[in-house]
Structure formats: C-alpha cells, structure tokens
C-alpha cells in the first residue's frame, strides 16, 4: 500500500462540519449540503445560542432531530422604546441554509440598526431595504452546484421598534406576535400554500393545520425567489407589551397567539424576556424538537422616558 493510499484511508475523520457528510482532502464544498468548507463560512457549532440584553433576549436551539442549526437571529436594543430584531430560518432543502440565514440576518439587521437611530428614515422603507439587503447577501453565499439542491435560501421576519412604534416585515413563514394585558395577536400571515388556501376559502384553519402543505412556502429570501414585495404591518401600542418573533420550530407546537400567550402567561409574573425565550424553546424541545427553534422576545413600553 502506498503512502498516499494510507493517508487517504486513515483520514476518515474528514467530515462536513455542517451536515457530517464524508469529505476528501482538498474539498472546498460539501457534496451533500453544498456548504463552503473554509473558515469564512463556518457552520453553527453550538447546540444552543442565547443572548440576554435585559429588555430583549433571544434563544436559538438546534432541537432534537436535525444535525445542525440552520436558524439565525440578530437583536439590538437601545432602550425600552427602540430595538431591532431579525429572525431567519434556513430552508432545509436548500444548499448552505445555515449560511443563508446567518448572512440574511446580519445584512437586514445592519440596515434596521441605522434606521433605528435615524428618525428621517421611514420605517416601512427601512424594512423593504433591509429585506433587499438580505436577498443580496444570500445571493453572494458560495456553494457548489454539483449537488441536487436548490439555491441557498431562508425565511425572514424582522421588526423595527422606534419610539414605541413597531414595523414588522416578513418573507416566508417565520412569525411575529404581540402580547399585552388586553391583546394576543399574530402580526404576520404565512407565505405558504396552506395560508393561501385559507384566504381563498379552500381550507379551514383546522384542515390547514393537518395539510401536508402546511410548511410549503410561496415566498422566501434567495436568488430563485419569486419577485414580489415583502409584506408589512405597523403597530402603535398604547400600553407596554411583548413582541415575539420565532421560526416554525417553535410555532409548530403553539401555532395560535392564544396558545403562545397562554404559555407566556403560565410563567411567574414579571418573567424577563430571557426567561420567556428559554421557556418557549424548552417547550418546543419537550414536545419533540423536530426542527431548529429560534425565538426572540422584546419588551416594548411606548410611554417610557
């Protein structure tokens, strides 16, 4: 046996850090998932990532089934009236979904961070620009076309909270909710075949929940996405409340605002955003953890000085 053969057979530990597929020395891309194999695009390494900023917090958990976490988030807080949050979910059937989600969250978050501080920046325009920046970032993700996967892509939900007013924009089926003393509301509507079936009267919500197309999305962030504007919603709260953004790995287990709000209400009074985010992520794992789980919780007080 030659020395070269020996080196090849003894390097069986070479594997993709993203999906675990076997690699050959010198490979630049994973043939299974399409991820680039250098330090400029590292895979998510931690099973769970937590960020606690006091009045806002986020948790991203790998869950119990998937081999990597393809979710990502960006969270910034200035005070109780001003914050930025972006949550992205890499599409599992796409190449390098984790990198797409990470780069999209960073690009969108950077735009919204500037808008949070610049009162001349129209919030709706900022959301549209942020999602455009996310699309451009995902287009730049390097991957190999030698595998039978679609282009890198992800879902995105974002919120710009400025002076107590909230503007939410989204693409795909990651969601935003608002909770206060008198209200529990889902702010977003999924870009999915199931949701479109409900809107057209073809499905009841109960039928949609059991539909095999529940998570078949009709819009996403990526180079092959349909050309249509993101959807937006604005909210001007009159009282303090809690903004929750999450991926489907969480809302699968508590899809309605009432159910999700009930879980939050079940926590001790005054539970901080970090405690809420951890509890919701733990709930999703306790109920199966079949997908990556990401949740961001932001407390907003429009009357704060």
Image: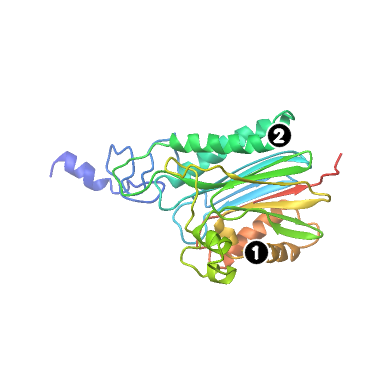
Q: Position of residue 223 (x, y in %)?
A: 43, 40
Where disc 1 sits, the SS reads: loop
Vertical order, 9 against 126 (above or below): below
Residue ID at (22%, 42%): 7
Vertical order, 100 against 262 (above or below): above
Please tell me which residue lies in front, 23 or 295. 295
Residue 116: image tag: 2
Q: Position of residue 129 (x, y in %)?
A: 59, 34
Left or right? Give the position of 133 relative to 27. Answer: right
Residue ID at (61%, 58%): 281
Please tell me which residue lies in front, 5 or 221. 221
Left or right? Give the position of 288 relative to 177. Answer: left
Please tell me which residue lies in front, 195 or 6. 195
Q: Residues within 10 Å of mark 2 (few under 14, many from 20)?
A: many
Q: Quadrant of the N terminus?
A: top left
Separation of marks 1 and 2 at Cα, in angstroms: 29 Å
Vertical order, 73 against 259 (above or below): above
Left or right? Give the position of 125 relative to 95. Answer: right
Q: Residues within 10 Å of mark 1 (few under 14, many from 20)?
A: some
Q: Is residue 45 visible?
A: no
Left or right? Give the position of 222 relative to 273. Answer: left
Residue picked out by circle 1: 256
Vertical order, 181 against 299 (above or below): below
Please tell me which residue lies in front, 79 or 115. 115
How many numbered markers are drawn?
A: 2
Where disc 2 sits, the SS reads: helix
Residue ID at (50%, 38%): 135
Q: Which quadrant of the figure has residue 108?
A: top right
Q: Position of residue 170 (x, y in %)?
A: 59, 47
């Amino acid at each position: 046996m030659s020395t070269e053969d020996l080196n090849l057979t003894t390097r069986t530990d070479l594997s993709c850090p993203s999906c675990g597929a076997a690699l050959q020395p010198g490979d630049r891309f994973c043939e299974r998932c399409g991820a680039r194999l250098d330090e400029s695009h590292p895979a998510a390494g931690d099973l769970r990532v937590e960020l606690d900023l006091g009045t806002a917090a986020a948790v991203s958990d790998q869950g119990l089934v998937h081999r990597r976490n393809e979710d990502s988030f960006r969270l910034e807080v200035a005070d109780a009236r001003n914050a930025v949050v972006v949550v992205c979910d890499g599409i599992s059937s796409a190449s390098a979904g984790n990198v797409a989600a990470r780069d999209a969250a960073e690009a969108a978050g950077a735009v919204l961070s500037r808008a949070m501080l610049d009162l001349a920046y129209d919030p709706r325009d900022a959301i549209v620009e942020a999602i455009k920046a996310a699309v451009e970032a995902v287009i730049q993700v390097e991957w190999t076309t030698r595998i039978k996967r679609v282009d890198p892509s992800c879902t995105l939900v974002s919120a710009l909270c400025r002076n107590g007013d909230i503007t939410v924009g989204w693409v795909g089926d990651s969601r935003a909710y608002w909770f206060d003393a008198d209200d529990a509301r889902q702010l977003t509507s999924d870009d999915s075949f199931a949701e479109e079936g409900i809107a057209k009267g073809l499905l009841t919500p109960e039928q949609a929940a059991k539909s095999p197309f529940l998570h078949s999305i009709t819009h996403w962030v990526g180079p092959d996405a349909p050309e249509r504007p993101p959807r937006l919603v604005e909210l001007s709260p009159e009282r303090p409340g809690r903004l929750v953004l999450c991926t489907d790995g969480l809302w699968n287990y508590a899809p309605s605002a009432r159910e999700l709000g009930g879980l939050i209400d079940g926590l001790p009074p005054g539970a901080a955003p970090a405690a809420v985010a951890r509890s919701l992520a733990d709930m999703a794992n306790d109920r199966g953890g079949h997908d990556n789980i990401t949740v961001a919780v932001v407390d907003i007080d429009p009357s704060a000085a």
